[in-house]
Structure formats: structure tokens, C-alpha cells
Amino acid sequence: MDKNLPVGVIDSGVGGLSVLKVLQQALPHEDFLYIGDTARTPYGQRPEKEIRAMVHDLTDYLDNAGIKLLVVACNTITVLGTESIRNGYAFDVVGMSKGAELALGVTKNKKIGVMATPFTVASGAHKAAVNALDADAEVFAQGCPDFVPLIEQGVFSGAAIEDAVARYSAPLKEAGVDTVLLSCTHYPFIRAEIEKGFGEGVTVLDPAEATALQARIFLERAGLLKMQGTGRSRVCFTAELNRGKAIAELMLDMERSSFEEISLL
């Protein structure tokens, strides 16, 4: 495989831009091809069969374009399993880190909160990942269905966000968690509001850095890691290009990024 091919990145919308930002920083010589499916977001409230079909559309597009590795910058898609996503393709697939080791390294009372989409919460994946490392740890998962629609509209603060944070943090505060995993790549956009909602004594974590490290390891092991040159990012959305670009301006190195609207059909 040609090491000069880009790394593919997929998400249900703009949330994966938070991961692309970390990837740009961790892998400065790599080119990236990002697709945010803004035409069909959100994914987290859809049936599994429907999500799989949409992921197939995204992955087929990247396969035809040519990539050397796929980073799934979406926890909902990651829950489907990286092996099932990879099936039939020549490239490896890196999913979002569940952050289990990260959370266990931070928590003092072994009570860990997870904020995620309803689909991710229903999977039980984060509880399984944490308990596989520490059977005594307690995991409290909270579905946050209102977050993604607000973030996709560029709403990162204000009354609507504060109300949603208050509703979704209340059960986790009642459970006594001291550590919270942001288990949807959209949520780092409102991390400050979430941290404010929980107050002092609760640490809010973003697993994106662990995901970027996994991507680097995959590339190194395969002999595909680029060690020179300035990487560029081609950022594609399936709808509402201007809105996606406006949100990207908050996250990305714009001098290294180009934008376009594409059709998957």
C-alpha cells in the first residue's frame, strides 16, 4: 500500500472534527480525507441496520478515493465493531477509544460516568471495557439525545445547552461519579459547559488523544507512517457545507484544510 495515500476519517456529522484536530496535531505529516454525513445526522437514535448501511456508504466512498487507514471518529459507529466495518476492504480500521484505561487512571472512587448517544449507551460497550480492566469499578451511562442536534446547528452555549447539560448530568451527579467520559465526538465542542455543569470534583475526559495514538501505532506497524512534508486535510460534508466549514474554523488548521460538499449516492 502507498504510504502517500491519505488517512480516512468518518463521522455522522461535524463531531469528528474534534478528532481530526487531534489527528492533525499527532500526525502532522499525514494527509486526511474526512467525511461528515451532515445530510443524515444524527446516527445515535437510528436502528443498527440503518446505521450499518450508512457506514457502508461512507466507507465505500473512501475506498474508491483511496486511503491507507480508516479512523472512525464516531463512538456510535465504533460500537458496530471495527472488524465488521473493515470486512472486504484492504485498509485497517481504528475505532474511537472507549477511554477505559484513561478513566480508571483518573477516578478516585471508581465511579465513572459515560455521556453518549442512546445507541452507544444501549450497547453497554463502555461498561464492559471498564469492567474488563477493573471488575470493582461502577459505570453509569447516560444517553444525551439532545446534544448532537444542537451541536450540529452550531449551538455550543446558552440556555438550550445549559438545560440539556443539567438534565443529563443530574443522574450522574446523583450516582456520585468523579470522572466522566465524553463518549461521543460531538461533545468536546461543549466540554466547557459540561465541566461547568458538573462543577469541581468531577474530571471530564475526551478519549480522542488515545484514538490518535492508536492510529499512529497502526501506521508505524504497517510501515505507512509519513515522516516528512506538511499534511493537508480534505474535509467533506454531505450537506450544509457552509455550516460545516464555520464549525471547522473553530477546530482545525485552516491553512492545511480544504472543504467541499459531496454526494454519497
Image (spheres, rainbow, N blue to C red):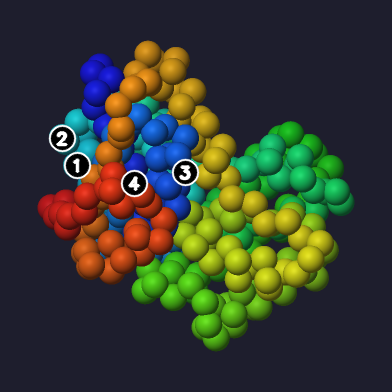
The residue indicated by pointer 4 is: 10
**Front residue (pair 64, 81):** 64
Residue that carries the numbered disc 1 in the rendered image = 61
Relative to residue 224, is residue 149 depicted above or below? below
- The answer to the question of whether label 1 and label 4 lie on touching residues, with beta carbons closer than 8 A, is no
Q: How far apart, in angstroms, are the residues tagged by discs 1 and 3? A: 23 Å
* Of marks 1 and 3, the one in the foreground: 3
For badge 3, the amino acid type reads Val
The image's mark for residue 223 is: none
**Quadrant the N terminus occupies:** top left
- Mark 1 falls on what kind of element? helix
Q: CA distance from mark 1 to mark 4?
A: 10 Å
80 above or below 132? Answer: below
Q: Amino acid at mark 4?
A: Ile
- Near mark 4 (Cα within 10 A), the count class, few <14, some 14-19 or many ≥20, is many
Q: Would you name the residue on which mark 2 appears?
A: 64
Q: CA distance from mark 2 to mark 3?
A: 25 Å
Q: Amino acid at mark 2?
A: Asn
Q: Tell me the SS state at disc 4.
A: strand
Query: Around disc 2, counting alpha carbons within 10 Å, would you say few (fewer than 14), some (14 to 19), or many (20 or more)?
Result: few
Q: In this rendering, which labeled residue sits more in front, label 3 or label 4?
A: 3
Image: 160 above or below 265: below
